[in-house]
Amino acid sequence: MTRILWVAEAVTLAHVARPLAALRHVDPARWQSVIACDPRARRHLQGIDAEYRPLPAIEPARFLAALRRGAPVYDLATLRGYVEAELRLFRDTRPDLVIGDFRLSLGISARIARIPYATLASACWSPQYEPPSWPVPALSLTRWLPLPLAQTLFRNARCHAFVRHAKPMNRLRREFGLPTIDGDVRNVYTDADYVLYTDVPELFPLEGLPTHARFVGPALWEPPIASAWSWPEANESIPRVYVTLGSSGDAALLPRIVETLGALRVSALVSTAARRDRLPVFPNVHVADLLPGVAVSASASLVVCNGGTLSCYQALSAGVPVVAVASNLEQFLTSQAIERTGAAVCLRADRFDPRRFRDTVTRAIEDRPLRDNATKIAGWCRTCSLDRTIPAFLQQLGARA
């Protein structure tokens, strides 16, 4: 039996969810799975047919603070510690294949150990992807600068920033005698023997996709929720709105989002992603720490999320349109790609206006073309889905071996 080591970098829920979603489609009779992640994410592993190994990661608060500053997430010392921990893990588990999600140091440790390495990545980080424009993310400064000025500054500084973000990894590669990577953080994010893009190709047309990269489709995952859930209003003629800003959205906006929805003729379910903020109470709004996002999205009229792949695909796979309140660059790139298909509306977290949000939600619920376009994307999700692509990828690896 061949052993796969799945490594999840538990700085956001999405980076844990994507390996878990892919792991479900591995034949346990042929492949033995071991999953490694920070102990704080272990609660999400219930029902997973895999051996667990602890692998510490930086705190999510540190990760999110770096994103807000536009600073590199990992310094040299952290990455060095990651490589050392991974080499110990390899010696203990003896994997035949490593599949990681945003554990960037695997690009070094797996090469040192001579283990084939695949990375799960968002297609917006492909070096072959060039969006029509690069949106400025919600940084500390963008809340105070005029948006056109912030956009101009970001456009002029982006290439330099991408090089800066790649520097710690390249310094560490030199320490271990490995060749450096072209100075662009996208090359760091996709540095692997195999790159598995957890998107549908229609949203991210990639010119000149290399042979070691492929689309595997969206990771549809939801937390194991034992408690029952239901919409506050049982009348299905009342529009249903599911809200989740995930673990990386701007949680400070949740009170204003709840207040806005509380004043509308909607039935709302709100997931705080276990971030315990005090929220206003309304009879038409139910709040929970965690909700089964796939099931809730499928019964909703509209999904309000942070624009990340996990929540967006939960909605789109069910043909439900999205209103994204985006903060970081990946959220903007993903939600704006969906917006260009006519299945989403993207708003800025750092320019949140309750009146504009109210009007956007009201229009989106009634917008038939928006739902039709979401239904079209649902068809793309069925064509490119993990239940087919992951077994096919592993079968090809077996044939090559």
Image: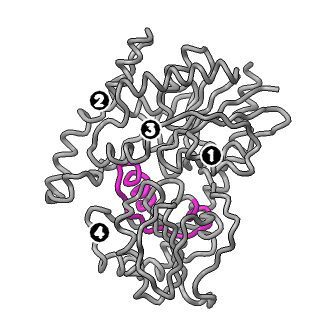
**Residue corresponding to mark 3:** 58
Dividing the picture into quarters, in which one does residue 360 lie?
Answer: bottom left
Q: Nearer the viewer, mark 4 or mark 3?
A: 3
Quadrant of the image containing the N terminus: top right
**In the image, which disc is placed on residue 352?**
4
Q: CA distance from mark 3 to mark 1?
A: 15 Å
- Left or right: residue 289 compared with residue 138: right
Residue 79 seen from this side: yes
Question: Residue 21, position in %: x, y?
Answer: 66, 48
Instruction: Give how far apart the Cα atoms at labels 1 and 2 are.
Output: 34 Å
Say few, some or many: other residues with alpha carbon within 10 Å of mark 1 (under 14 / 14 to 19 / 20 or more): some
Tell which circle, 2 or 4, labels the residue nearer the N-terminal end.
2
* 240 over 382 or under it: above or below: below
Location of residue 159 by image quarter: top left
Label whose residue precedes the other's in the sequence (4 or 3) = 3
Report the residue at 55% width, 17% height from top: 111
**Mark 2, secondary structure of its residue:** helix
Whole-angstrom CA distance, mark 4 to mark 3, is 29 Å
* Residue at the spot 38% in from the left edge and 17% down from the top edge: 180
Is 325 on the left-hand or right-hand side of 37? left
x then y, percent, for residue 167: 32, 25
Disc 2 marks which amino acid?
Val
Q: Which residue is mark 1?
A: 42
Which residue is disc 2 drawn over? 163
Marks 3 and 2, the one that precedes in the sequence = 3
